[in-house]
Amino acid sequence: MTVRLMLTRHGETPSNLRHALDSRPPGPSLTEMGHRQASALADRLAGDRVVAVYASIAVRAQETAAPVARRHGLAVEVVEGIHELQVGDLEGLSDEDSLRRFGLVYDRWTRGDLAASMPGGESGEQLRARYLSTLEQICAKHDDGLVVVVSHGGIIRLGAEWLADNVGARLAGAKLLPNTGHVLLEPRDAGWHCLEWTGVDL
């Protein structure tokens, strides 16, 4: 028996269209395109043995998870700890300087400098602690099948680097996840191994 973990980004939101930094839950709902993307995600996973569907406390994650859960006769389990990294003073901003400041801190995190913090927001240490502990609690409940965890692009890329033996700083920092893109992990030795990054085998 083998459990697989699919870390999935939510569908499109109005903030995505504006390229705005949007981290504070509960946040906006999906756009019409986002709902179509969520339905398409459910279609893609229709043939998989999905045993549980989890979502962050953000509305967009729950709305994305709902069609997947319905397709498999499951309820969406909403959990704390896997919501997006908190950008603090940069919340809602989309100007070039704010995006640059975000990128500088995020790059430091991918290179292991977890003491760095978003201005007025979380440090990498805080983020890692809450995210990994939540995933550990989720995984402890399942020993087989596909577990779908719908959350957010920034935190998924970091989480994949922290968990997987074949994901490093270059991939986590540069390989953005599209809306409803995913990272697929399976247990390997004492940790995890990344099988797919949005449909691309690793």
Image (tube, grey):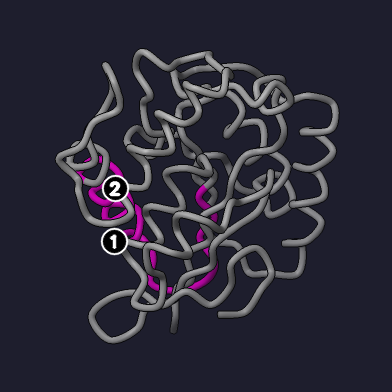
> Which one is nearer the viewer's eye here, 161 or 193?
161
Span shown in magenta:
129-149
Q: Earlier in the sequence, mark 2 or mark 1?
A: 2
* Inter-mark Cα distance, 2 to 1: 27 Å
Quarter of the rendering containing residue 30: top right
**Residue in the picture at 51% in, 40% down:** 152
Residue on which the image places disc 2: 109
Q: Position of residue 96 (x, y in %)?
A: 56, 24
Quadrant of the snapshot with the C terminus:
bottom right
> Which one is nearer the viewer's eye here, 60 or 67?
60
Q: Residues within 10 Å of mark 1 (few under 14, many from 20)?
A: few
> Which one is nearer the viewer's eye here, 54 or 14?
14
**Residue in the picture at 44% in, 18% down:** 24
Q: Is residue 158 above or below residue 92?
A: below
Secondary structure of the residue carrying tag 1 is loop
Q: Position of residue 113 (x, y in %)?
A: 20, 49
Q: Residue flagged by tag 1: what amino acid is it?
A: Ala
Residue on which the image places disc 1: 140
Check the image and name the residue furthest to the front: 97
Side of 111 where 53 appears, left or right: right
Q: Position of residue 189 (x, y in %)?
A: 28, 86
Disc nearest the viewer among 2 and 1? 2
- Check residue 185 in the rendering and tell me which mark sits there, or answer none: none
Side of 35 where 97 appears, left or right: left
Residue 145 is one of the magenta-drawn residues: yes
Q: Are marks 2 and 1 in contact (CB under 8 Å)?
A: no
Residue 142 is one of the magenta-drawn residues: yes
**Residue in the picture at 30% in, 45% down:** 131
Secondary structure of the residue carrying tag 2 is helix
Q: Residues within 10 Å of mark 2 (few under 14, many from 20)?
A: many
Q: Position of residue 115 (x, y in %)?
A: 14, 40
**Residue in the picture at 54% in, 55% down:** 148
